[in-house]
Image (tube, rainbow, N blue to C red):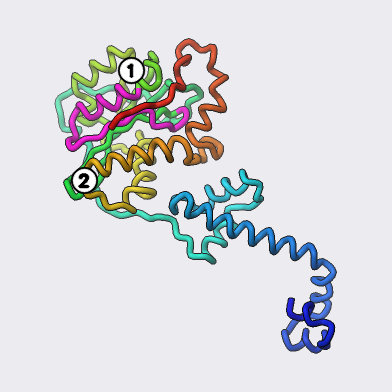
């Protein structure tokens, strides 16, 4: 650029020698100057938009998801290019912390359900299979426990419940909210671990009354409920580990906002072809308009915490 801008008064051959440039390469670059200028501008636009989206999404997206978002905006780029931009601009995705609290107590005398899921996480209709699980969130007041219910079809959080104790009422509340939000569908397989909360007679009674079918993971096999575990890992990496909660109420409000305003509505999933759960359901809802079991499948969730 310096040689071109000052070509009227400097010796180009000498300048190329000083800057250790091949003269023919310089002239080749000069003959395609407009093209190179456009490419440089395009790269700069890509860089600026990558930085903007990175902070817009609160450091939650890596190169794969940022690339998908950029392509949706008409900026054609690969994850590799985005990864280079992130590295050059010190854009570091929010990370993990390591500590673990056991949330599954399978040492009980309740009868457990057979494993009907068998790690088959691909579902072609809404309200066919739900997965439920419990996790924990640290606050200055003590642990807050979160029970969730996810529809495998769209990976949407269709029900959840929070409380200071890890009881059967916690998971029953999450299931009841899920069923209500989806219009009380019948025949849903509801999969969980073998914890005492899910094996309790009260929980089984709710399943039976709702016309649902229970399913449980094999003992000690967390991979049987990998979708629920994946959501918890995402929640904690993207939000919980970046936040200090003074009270349980503060944590409840924050998690409510994360699920309703971000995870269900905005966060893209590779299993959904780069769509969020709500986007995926809205695009595909007409496919099930005449299906009696799913006619109320896509009612919006309205959950109080």
**With respect to residue 8, does 267 lie above or below?**
above
**Residue located at (24% from left, 23% from top):** 112
Q: Secondary structure at mark 2?
A: loop
Task: Assess whether mark 1 and mark 2 are in contact (beta carbons under 8 angstroms).
Answer: no
Q: Which quadrant holds residue 195?
A: top left
**With respect to residue 98, does 220 lie above or below?**
above
Mark drawn on residue 247: 2
Q: Which quadrant holds residue 224?
A: top left
**Residue located at (44% from left, 54% from top):** 59
Give x and y (percent) for residue 20: 73, 84
As rendered, which of 180 and 107 lies closer to the eye?
180
**Residue located at (82% from left, 72% from top):** 30
Give x and y (percent) for residue 291: 51, 12
Region in magenta: 153-178
Q: Which quadrant holds residue 145?
A: top left
Looking at the figure, which quarter contains the N terminus?
bottom right
**Residue located at (21% from left, 35% from top):** 163
Q: Disc 2 vs disc 1: which is toward the camera?
A: 2
Give x and y (percent) for residue 65: 52, 47
Q: Is residue 124 left or right of residue 174?
A: right
Residue topped by disc 1: 213
Mark drawn on residue 165: none
Q: CA distance from mark 2 to mark 1?
A: 36 Å
Query: Does the image show residue 114?
Result: no
* Magenta segment includes 163: yes
Q: Secondary structure at mark 1?
A: strand
Looking at the figure, which quarter contains the C terminus?
top left
Give x and y (percent) for residue 48: 58, 59
Which of the marked residues, 2 or 1, is nearer the chain's N terminus?
1
Q: Residues within 10 Å of mark 1 (few under 14, many from 20)?
A: some
As rendered, which of 45 and 17 lies closer to the eye?
45
């Amino acid at each position: 650029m310096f040689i071109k801008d000052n070509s009227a008064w400097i010796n180009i051959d000498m300048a190329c020698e000083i800057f250790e440039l091949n003269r023919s390469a310089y002239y080749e670059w000069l003959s395609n100057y407009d093209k190179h200028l456009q490419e440089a501008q395009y790269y700069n636009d890509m860089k600026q938009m990558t930085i903007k989206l990175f902070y817009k999404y609160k450091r939650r997206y890596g190169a794969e998801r940022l690339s998908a978002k950029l392509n949706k905006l008409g900026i054609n780029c690969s994850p590799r290019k985005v990864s280079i931009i992130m590295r050059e601009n010190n854009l570091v995705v929010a990370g993990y912390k390591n500590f673990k609290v056991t949330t599954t107590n399978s040492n009980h005398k309740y009868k457990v359900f057979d494993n009907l899921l068998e790690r088959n996480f691909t579902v072609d209709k809404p309200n066919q299979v739900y997965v439920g699980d419990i996790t924990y969130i640290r606050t200055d007041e003590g642990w807050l426990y979160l029970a969730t219910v996810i529809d495998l079809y769209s990976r949407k959080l269709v029900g959840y419940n929070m409380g200071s104790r890890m009881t059967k009422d916690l998971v029953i509340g999450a299931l009841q909210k899920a069923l209500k939000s989806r219009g009380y569908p019948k025949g849903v397989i509801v999969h969980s671990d073998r914890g005492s909360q899910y094996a309790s007679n009260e929980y089984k009674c709710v399943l039976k009354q709702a016309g649902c079918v229970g399913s449980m993971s094999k003992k000690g096999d967390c991979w049987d409920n990998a979708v629920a575990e994946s959501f918890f890992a995402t929640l904690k990496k993207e939000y919980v580990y970046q936040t200090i909660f003074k009270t349980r109420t503060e944590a409840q409000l924050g998690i409510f906002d994360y699920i309703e305003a971000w995870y269900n509505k905005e966060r893209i999933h590779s299993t959904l072809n780069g769509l969020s759960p709500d986007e995926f359901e809205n695009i595909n809802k007409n496919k099930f308009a005449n299906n009696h079991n799913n006619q109320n499948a896509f009612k919006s969730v309205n959950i109080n915490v």
